[in-house]
């Protein structure tokens, strides 16, 4: 059993969003933004549905969280995302000054840590590898189904 309000708990909620993306034919990336142990934004990839290459889960969640908070800075928030953010998303997270980013699976092809390790705000805490196996299995299943 996953302990409530732990990184694993919130990552499971992000995985629930990724499953929604999977079911609608999107690359299964999901995320949630948390403030004071409360989920204030949920999102998953919408690039196919919106025909918009910028409609990544992280971008959708940043917009929703900023709207919820009434401001553009997410200093006191944590984003849980099932795949390491790309350079675009890491840049947006950097501009939002998010306090912490927790991701499940690394992305050696497109992840920010390979191509733009300085994209995040210098004060942002990064945690990787939370529920990696579950996120990786979902991603693998998606791409096997596409073949």
Image: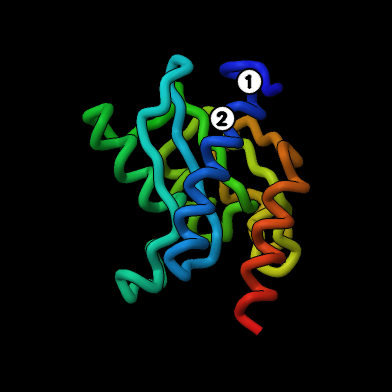
Instruction: Tell me where residue 145 appears, x and y as whole percent.
Output: 63, 76
Q: Residue furthest bottom?
A: 147
Q: Quadrant of the C terminus?
A: bottom right
- Whether pointer 1 and pointer 2 mark residues with C-beta atoms closer than 8 Å, the reply is yes
Frontmost residue, 24 versus 82: 24
Judged left or right of residue 23, residue 124 is right
- Rounded to the nearest angstrom, the CA distance separating label 1 from label 2 is 6 Å
Task: Say if 76 sits above or below 111 in the image.
Answer: above
What residue appears at the point 58 percent right and 29 percent down from the top-left corner?
123
Q: Quadrant of residue 71?
A: top left
What element does badge 2 sit on?
helix
Colour option used: rainbow
Which disc is residue 30 wearing?
Answer: none
Crowdedness of circle 2 by 10 Å Cα count: few (<14), some, many (20+)?
Answer: many
Q: Quadrant of residue 122?
A: top right
Q: Quadrant of residue 144?
A: bottom right
What element does badge 1 sit on?
loop
Q: Quadrant of the N terminus?
A: top right
Frontmost residue, 23 versus 45: 23
Frontmost residue, 4 versus 7: 4
Q: Which residue is mark 2?
A: 10
Instruction: Tell me where residue 30 appears, x and y as whole percent.
Output: 51, 49
What residue appears at the point 48 percent right and 33 percent down from the top-left corner?
98
Task: Say if 35 sits above or below 14 in the image.
Answer: above
What residue appears at the point 77 percent right and 48 percent down from the top-left corner?
133
Q: How many badges with numbers are in the image? A: 2
Instruction: Tell me where residue 6 appears, x and y as whole percent.
Output: 63, 20
What residue appears at the point 72 percent right and 39 percent down from the top-left corner?
131
Q: Which residue is mark 1?
A: 6
């Amino acid at each position: 059993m996953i302990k409530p309000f732990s990184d694993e708990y919130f990552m499971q909620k992000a995985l629930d969003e990724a499953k929604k993306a999977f079911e609608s034919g999107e690359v299964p990336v999901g995320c949630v933004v948390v403030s004071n142990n409360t989920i204030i934004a949920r999102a998953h990839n919408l690039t196919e549905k919106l025909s918009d290459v910028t409609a990544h889960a992280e971008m959708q969640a940043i917009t929703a969280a900023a709207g919820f908070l009434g401001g553009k800075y997410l200093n006191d928030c944590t984003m849980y995302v099932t795949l390491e953010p790309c350079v675009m998303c890491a840049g947006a997270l950097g501009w939002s000054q998010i306090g912490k980013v927790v991701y499940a699976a690394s992305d050696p092809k497109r992840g920010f840590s390979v191509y733009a390790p300085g994209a995040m705000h210098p004060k942002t805490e990064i945690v990787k590898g939370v529920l990696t196996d579950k996120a990786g299995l979902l991603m693998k299943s998606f791409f096997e189904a596409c073949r």
